[in-house]
Amino acid sequence: MQSVCLITGASAGIGAALARVFAQNGHTLVLTARREAQLLALADEIASRGYTRPHVIAADLGQPDGPSRLAEALGAAGLEPSVLVNNAGFGMLGEAPDIDRDAQLAIVNLNIRALTDLSLRWLEPIRRHRGGILNVASIASFIPGPGMAVYHASKAFVLSFSEAMHEELKADGVKVCALCPGPVDTEFNDRAGVPHGYFPAFLNRSAERVARDGYQGFMAGHRVVVPGKPNRIFTLLPRLLPRGLMLAMVDWRRKHLTAG
């Protein structure tokens, strides 16, 4: 079996940026997402820069059999992950009672169930290769989010799960890190229905910056990486302010920006 770095949600945004950074640092990649054409284009781009051409496996990890089908394809190709980057995920803007229930459960299926499945599925080779798991969470992990309730809750799970796994696996030489970016201008916002200017501009970071910071922190063995000083300050606010006040502030700003 050839060991590889598996990156989910790699067709665009932070996932594609992470693929470029890992490739630049000598990792052999497997790129997966639903959209095969975008994955192939990214693989061609990486190869054209002189790096090892990534393997491409199209998969819908939001489906119940998505992780197992991905695992079967990897096994058939003689590949096993030594590094896993769980980037696939999405959210939706709107109050939970007003959003389709199945759509919200789909967030749980991808952001939580699939991430957990993949993380546990390949622990044996990850341990054997003394590799690691980089889970893309969010600064949303640190506080409940009225207007994106399920998304915030799902990312809180990712942060908690990653921190616990970091502690459990560090004695085995395995790195586990939660990457918690703030707002990034990617397709995520379009899919979530987030209007331009919804997030404070001073929190914004590019996908490339997030990927670089995430890779460096992961390789350094950090438990949590929050790109950008303003975002790091934001993650401290729940420790300094009453939780009810933080909730009211988030909800007020959301209602103010979406009014009308």
Image (cartoon, grey):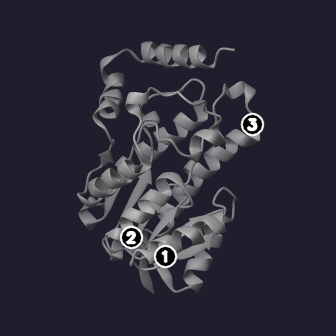
Chain-order first, disc 1 or disc 2: 2
**Residue 75, position as x, y percentages in the image:** 56, 82
Q: Residue under label 3, please give it.
A: 101
Q: Is label 2 in a helix, a strand or a loop?
A: helix
20 vs 129, left or right, is: right
Q: CB atoms at circles 1 and 2 under 8 Å apart?
A: yes
127 relative position to 35: left or right: left
Q: Could you say whether the residue bearing mark 3 is in a helix, strand or loop? A: helix
- What residue appears at the point 43 percent right and 53 percent down from the top-left corner? 135
Few, some or many C-alpha atoms within 10 Å of disc 3 (few <14, some 14-19, many ≥20)? few
Amino acid residing under circle 2: Ala
Please name which of the two marks, 3 or 1, marks the residue nearer to the observer: 1
Local secondary structure at mark 1: loop
Place of residue 122 in the rendered image (x, y in percent of width and height, measured from the top left): 47, 70
In the rendered image, is residue 212 in sight?
yes
Considering only vertical position in the picture, is 194 above or below 28?
above
C-alpha separation, residue under disc 1 versus residue under disc 2: 8 Å
* Picture coordinates of residue 116, whole percent (x, y): 52, 56
Locate the C terminus and report the quarter of the image it occupies.
top right
- Per the rendering, the mark at residue 54 is 1
Disc 1 residue type (three-letter): Pro
